[in-house]
Amino acid sequence: DAKTTQPNSMESNEEEPVHLPCNHSTISGTDYIHWYRQLPSQGPEYVIHGLTSNVNNRMASLAIAEDRKSSTLILHRATLRDAAVYYCILRGLGEGDKIIFGKGTRLHILP
Amino acid sequence: GAVVSQHPSWVICKSGTSVKIECRSLDFQATTMFWYRQFPKQSLMLMATSNEGSKATYEQGVEKDKFLINHASLTLSTLTVTSAHPEDSSFYICSALLAGSADTQYFGPGTRLTVL
């Protein structure tokens, strides 16, 4: 499985943008980049995914480097409810569809 | 987005008893569901892949006779923890696969099991 590297933790002030980085230097051409987040005492929540182009949805934006070896999840205006562990995951074809979670980035939002 | 529910949300049981946890996909059909376990301050650990109409596929180190999985319909998978012991106390989370582009998984809210 292609691996991802994320910082263990990050802090951000409320109402400011947050950029969560993820390195995936061994990504293959068919790997999708997925982001999930897990709020305290809840199951993970799908955030966004992309393949090559940048993606936007109501929750966040995903910026993918041109060489696809890194990506950044962007929360445009963080709120206290965005405090969670964010997981960057690569999902390729033919891997049985299962997700193997890494340690993720614990995001702290400061009021 | 797609919704997955789990029941119960929490359960306390005595050592030696069995506990069944249900996972339902509410607004879509899922031929594949997954079961995870999460200990405090740790990441999710995949236990098994549940396939509708066939036997589950267990990850290495997970005892299939202890964690019984049944996926009898396209919207329901159950995990039964048999002869539970205190070390089985954990947060159990299921997910359901929504087939399509990139095969997104949708997760249930989790079930907290406490074995006394």
Image (cartoon, grey):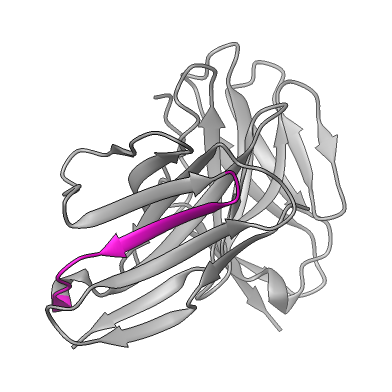
**Most foreground residue, A40 or B57:** B57
Number of marks in the rendered image: 0
Percent across and percent down for residue A10 are: 55, 62
Q: Which residues are magenta?
A: B74-86
Residue B97 appears left or right of A74: left
What residue lies at 54% left-to-right and 64% top-to-bottom? A43
Q: Is residue B35 above or below residue A108?
A: above
Q: Name the residue nearer the viewer: B69 or B113.
A: B69
Residue A85 in the image: above or below residue A29: below
The location of residue A97, given as percent across then percent down, is 50, 30
Point out the image quarter for the N terminus of chain A. Answer: top left
Residue B35: x, y in percent? 40, 52
Q: Please name the residue shown 49% across and 22% down the image.
A: A25
Q: Is residue B40 visible?
A: no
- Indicate whether residue B94 is drawn in magenta: no
Is residue B75 located in the magenta-colored stretch of the structure?
A: yes
- Residue B88, relative to residue A26: is it above or below? below
Q: Position of residue B51 (x, y in %)?
A: 45, 36
Residue at 45% of width from left, 22% of height from top? Answer: A95
User: Which quadrant does the C terminus of chain A fall into?
Assistant: bottom right
Asked if residue B23 lies left or right of residue A55, the reply is left
